[in-house]
Amino acid sequence: MKDLIHSIMNIFRWVGKILTGFRIFTMNIVFLLLLFFLFSAITSQNQKSEGTVSKRGALLLSLSGDIVEEKKMTDPMSTLVNNMLGFERLPTETLFQDILDAIKTAATDDNVTCILLDLSNLGSVGLNQLQIIGKALTEFKESKKPVIAAEDYYSQKAYYLASYADEVYLNPMGGVDLHGIGTFRLYFKDAIETLKINYNIFRVGTYKSALEPIMRNSMSPEAKTQNMSWLSVLWENISGDIIHERGLDANALNDYIENIASELATAGGDTARLALDTGLVDGLKTRAELREYLTTVTGKDSEGDFQQISLGHYLSTLSRSYIYNGLEEPSVGIIIAQGPILNGKQPIGAIGGDSLADMIREARENSNINALVLRVISGGGSVFASEIIRQEILQFKKTGKPIVISMGSMAASGGYWIAADADEIWASPVTLTGSIGIFAAIPTFEKSLANMGIYNDGVGTTSLASSLNLTRPISPLLKESISITLRHGYDQFLEIVSKGRAMDQVHVSEIAQGRVFDGQTARKIGLVDKLGSMDDAIQSAADLAGLSEYSARYIRKPQTVTDELLKIFSVQAAHWLSSVTVPQSLLTVLNRLLTPIREIMLFNDPKGLYAHCMIEDLSM
């Protein structure tokens, strides 16, 4: 009997081994197929990086999603499948440099007869980016090819870019939304008191308004004063550009906005007619009329529609700017630093103190990198992470290689902390910078818990034994210590700016206090050296390095296998969420509620100290 049981167990054991082996073999095959599919997807895209356009027509310049300077993770597998099936999924992000490359190449490409702007899905975009795209369109028009804008409806940011077109058309049922710009925030003081959250606030700087939403129910007079200062400069740029491009009277935009009710009454409530009468558009065309008109410009395709070349297809034929060509030659390195500054290693979309420091170190140790341009688009964040980055910049400077900062739409607070020691700082006239000040905010919930009948009590060997126990009030000794540390951090910030910019510390103190400046003003007071684009900063870095012939190339964070796998799941999840129908008004409210909370939740400074400018996206 014992032998029989033993024999049966051996049978099950062998069956188990066979099944286990089969399972492992199957999983390995699936894994190899997955790797092969990923490799095929990536290489197939790379192989199409340069070629020729197979047809002639209008370049459909579709600016879909947010305009970014470095893309977050994409999904090469679904991209390949969509391309094979003939589907084109709208991107959630469009690379800023891709837009410029397409416009520049199209100017000398005989296959491109004109540019047709498609702005219907334009997402978040910086004013400085719009200005540079507008300049590129102006240069394109020198080729004698027209730029045409045609929409059912123009948002303000879309119309700003459309104003650079030779011809602007509007659907007879559409309109042009011009309303000016502003910065408006939600304030939570009463809500926090209702929830009985005890927020312990520490800040330095009269104008450091990042914490006002939890301290007040309204914007402070100081914040209103400084915000109105830079808002006025930005609006002068926006309205001035539109007036110049459209050939309007100086007060045309202001009259259109401030007298919109009476002007609409005169036009019988017809928003499209008002836009035409005001000179904002050149004509009103239905979709059918527009297609018919475009066929006269580009000719008809096999389906009777106007001939067109999609932006995605066109980009697949181009050699992109600043991509490493594999040659060992003198070069200017470019690092994109975009997003909140956080401690440690962070993915694309955030600036990790360790991640960015590693890339700067890579540029320092590479003998073929003769100069570095650090493109900063950030409102700041962790003081500790900002200092780690600055320390690595100082190490880079010891090599004698120049480092130049190119500021994007915003480079403030921690973004300025990492910029101050550069050899040169470039910004656009509409960059927001400065905001030299730091803060700490620590909530404790002892009152909230007490309201529910929950209490915390105990003993400790010292008055700091409970440390930052969020269920207990912060001890007076700890509060005093945090205040002293914060003051030291602020003085350190002033000293960094004073030494880095070769400015008197008293003067730095006067222009600090958390105050935000536009690029033009920042140049006047010495926080910025020159006004210009990233291309200007690259040329300046090459000049400082004594390079007459050079290439410029991106230095990017290497992607791990985990990153590649996350691409699949994160993008598929985003794609599924995008298919869920949610009213846009609800999404806007949720975004306003969650954005400040989301940013605060990401903060991970070991000392809890932050140099962060929380000006919300103007959204034009």
Image: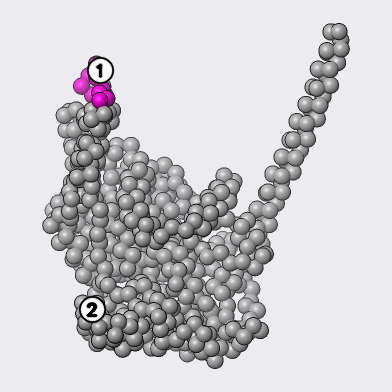
Q: Amino acid under label 1?
A: Gly
Q: Single out the mark in the foreground, 2 or 1.
A: 2
Quadrant (top left, top right, bottom left, bottom right) of the N terminus? top right
Residue 418 visible in this rendered orientation of the protein? no
Residue 125 covered by magenta stretch? no
Q: Amino acid under label 2?
A: Ala
Q: Residue at x 68, y 48 (%)?
A: 34
Of residues 537 and 562, the one nearer the viewer is: 562
Residue 19 visible in this rendered orientation of the protein? yes
Q: Which residue is mark 2?
A: 261
Q: Is residue 290 above or below residue 537?
A: below
Q: In what element is the residue under mark 1? A: loop
In three-dimensional space, the C-alpha distance between marks 2 and 1, rounded to whole angstroms, equals 66 Å
Are circles 2 and 1 on residues that touch, CB within 8 Å?
no
Q: Which comes sooner in the sequence, label 2 or label 1? A: 2
Residue range highlighted in magenta: 453-464
Tell me the quarter of the picture where residue 251 sits. bottom left
Q: Residue at x 43, y 78 (%)?
A: 152
Q: What numbered label is drawn on residue 375? A: none
Q: Residue at x 75, y 40 (%)?
A: 26
- Please give left or right for residue 489 compared with residue 592 in the image: left
Of residues 341 and 375, the one nearer the viewer is: 341
Q: Position of residue 343 (x, y in %)?
A: 38, 42
- Please give left or right for residue 137 compared with residue 51 in the image: left
- Please give left or right for residue 81 compared with residue 118 in the image: right
Q: Which residue is mark 1?
A: 458
Q: Position of residue 272 (x, y in %)?
A: 36, 83
Q: Residue at x 25, y 83 (%)?
A: 265
